[in-house]
Amino acid sequence: MKDKLDVTRDRRVFIRSRDFFVLFALIGLALVLFFVTWSTRTSSASVAKIYYDGQLLEVVELTSGTERDFLFDVDSSIVIRQFADQSIAFMASDCPDRVCIRSGKLRRPGEFAACVPNHFLIVIEGVAQFSDWEDVDLVA
Amino acid sequence: MSREERKPIPIRRLTRSAVLLAAALVLGWLEGVLPPLPAPIPLRYGLANVAVMATLIFIGPFETFSVAFLKSVFVFMTRGLIAGAVSMTGTLLSVGVMIVLETLFKRRTSVFLLSISGAIAHNLGQLIFLVLFMQYKISVLFVGPYLLLFGIATGILSGVLLYVMIRPLQSFFKKRD
């Protein structure tokens, strides 16, 4: 017996001309979002916010030349290191896949790394980026 | 007519689904040992999506849903409850979007459109889970551009892999019709 689904297999193409409109629309949307977020950055200085279970544990100013480790009572397996080159990274975790450590160094606003099994999150924010968010006049 | 040829279609669909589920699991494992994507946010290559898309093209929506669901169950068993839930939301949203596209375009969706929409929906689903259920303080506005651009890039990668595999898979399955 012939499988009726076999009929459609030969007609599958890699790309159609209309797909380019979708592609350009998505790239355009990404560029608009980049522009909006870039234009609201008021300072080149960044802070790293460390969350555990949605609660803010630590705000780390990413200043040049400062290098230190952060350990937490809520989970002793987590080690987060601030580097002298104004970056921060997960260094140790007992999670099975180590996605958080593999995320590497974070330094630019908007970057984040998450240790989902241990409920830890690091988010980089530009200074005053979010506190000024409500004041941004997008119309003007 | 051999005994194999007399087997009813549901058994054939089941075994095909099982082969593609096994491929999805192996590709998922392979993805875990590859170096991370050079992205500022944690994103994956989406290699397992190649097997999920192949299920959608070669078998059907219900089997695709089953393969995607069982792939996430495997993540749940090997990497824990939360990783499984993150995988589940991303995978199911991705499969949902791809099934809708296939229905809208009457099974004529291009591989490119299928793969990039699946990749973006997968990343978006995972982000939605992290923001809504894990209460992660992530600005969607900041993550959005990365999500879109890397979704396009990983979607093109999995789309090319699938397109290369369509003919071999076609002959593999036809030999067993």
Image (cartoon, grey):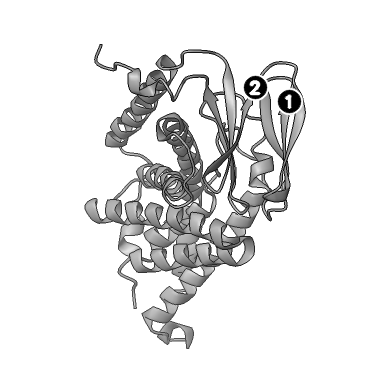
> Which residue corresponds to the image point at 67% horizontal and 18% vertical from the top-left?
A63
Q: Which residue is mark 2?
A: A62
Tell me if residue A18 comes above or below residue B121 in the rendering: above
- Image coordinates of residue B16 in percent, x first then y, are 47, 71
Q: Earlier in the sequence, mark 2 or mark 1?
A: 2
Image disc number at residue A83: 1
Tell me if residue B98 comes above or below residue A140 in the rendering: below
Q: Nearer the viewer, residue A17 or B66?
A: B66
Give the quadrant of the N terminus of chain A. Answer: bottom left
Q: Is residue A28 visible?
A: yes
- Image coordinates of residue A130 in percent, x first then y, are 44, 25
Q: Secondary structure at mark 2?
A: loop
Give the residue type that dot 2 points to.
Leu
Tell me if residue B176 comes above or below residue B96 in the rendering: below
Q: Nearer the viewer, residue A84 or A72?
A: A72
Q: Nearer the viewer, residue A16 or B176?
A: A16
> Which residue corresponds to the image point at 38% horizontal and 79% vertical from the top-left?
B10
Judge from the rendering whether residue A51 lies leftward or rightward of residue B16; answer left or right.
right
Q: Is residue B35 visible?
A: no
